[in-house]
Amino acid sequence: MSAKGTKKGVGPNLIFLIFCVGLVIACPVRMYIQIKNIDPSTGFYINSNYPLVELLSVVLIAASLFILIFSYCSSDIFSAVELKGRQIPLSVLSLFASITLVYDSIIELTGRDQRMAALVQSERSVETVEKLQGVFSFLAACWFIILFIGFLFGSNFFKKIKIFSLFPPCWVILSMLGKLLIAINYRKVSDMALELIAMIFMLLFLLSSARQLTDTNREGNFWLSVGSGIVASLLIFTYDIPRISLSLMGKTNLLVQGFPIRYSHLAIAFFAIGFIITALRKGSEADPDKIEKPAVPVKIEKAETAEETKTEQKQSAPVSDENGNFSVSANKNKPENKN
């Protein structure tokens, strides 16, 4: 028997609690590893068997598994959600995502992206994929601009242009392909492994949320948006927040050369969290089990007078016959025959 959506007590609050606890543990550990156990010139771990590297892996794997399992089993995760009306927070997050994607597109199309320069020499196949990635990054930005307009004015016109919802997943696939074409040990490169795994969950979220937003077979699909979106955000925040913190502290020399902060990933992570919270709130408002039903009017009969009550009691009193047997009078409230 499937456990999907059958468990109570494992609702969104518990899922977000796991997300927050995992992030609070993972970010400081990741920052310490960034400072002490990563070679900034190559991005490789100085010691791949470093205890904190293993601890970070255990924390992220455990948190991700619990988030996915609870999202699947929770009876409070609604299977289908339709966002109606103006959604200002989501419109702002969509605009942020579109701006960062356009920025990434410009960098990739102009050939100024040197992320792999510290690891390997650029190959023709990698360059081709990066150019395609730049094109689809711009097309993905168009989808988020469409969402920005729709959420800002409360219009669901994006349901009629579903083709644009496929561009963000295509951009993620090309980003992953560009990294997979490079022959290196991903486990030893600190940023590569985390980024690849995060993009897998980002891809699942973008596909699932596109089905929700475009009303394309969205029944029974929202749990995947919740699970994959929160896991992707957890992984992205884990490798981006320490880099941003080091940059703000003026310690850019500790950042891996050729691995700049991917603001588009960060923007989509924020969009994922915003989309999930908004959809859960709207779903809760629309849940028929949580809507109070109007009270059924009760017909109140007119109270009997004291005299009528006494008369009824007298008529229904037991009567003794000549043999000593008792019987109840059957003439209760019997109308008199005037004839």
Image (tube, helix red, strand yellow):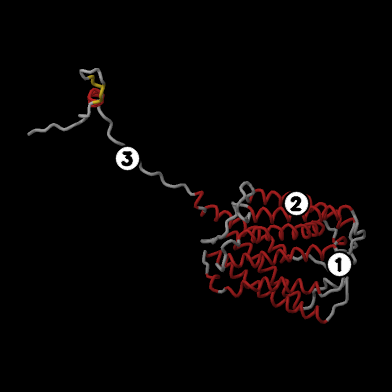
Q: Which residue is mark 2?
A: 22
Residue 301, horizontal then vertical, whole percent: 29, 36
| Measured Cα–Cα span from mark 2 to mark 1 | 27 Å
| Residue beneath the point at 76% across and 74% down | 107
| Residue beneath the point at 76% across and 75% down | 108
| Quadrant of the image occupied by residue 111 | bottom right
Amino acid type shown at disc 2:
Gly
| Quadrant of the image occupied by residue 167 | bottom right
| 73 and 253: which is toward the camera | 73
Q: Name which of mark 1 and mark 3 comes first in the sequence.
A: 1
| 66 and 163: which is toward the camera | 66
The answer to whether residue 174 is above or below residue 3 is below
Instruction: Return the residue found at the far right.
Output: 46
* Badge nearest the viewer, 3 or 2: 3
Amino acid type shown at disc 1:
Gln
* Badge nearest the viewer, 2 or 1: 2
Q: Which residue is mark 1?
A: 257
Residue 93, horizontal then vertical, whole percent: 64, 62
Q: Which residue is mark 3?
A: 299
SS for dot 3? loop
Residue 138, horizontal then vertical, whole percent: 68, 75
Callout 1–callout 3 Cβ contact below 8 Å: no
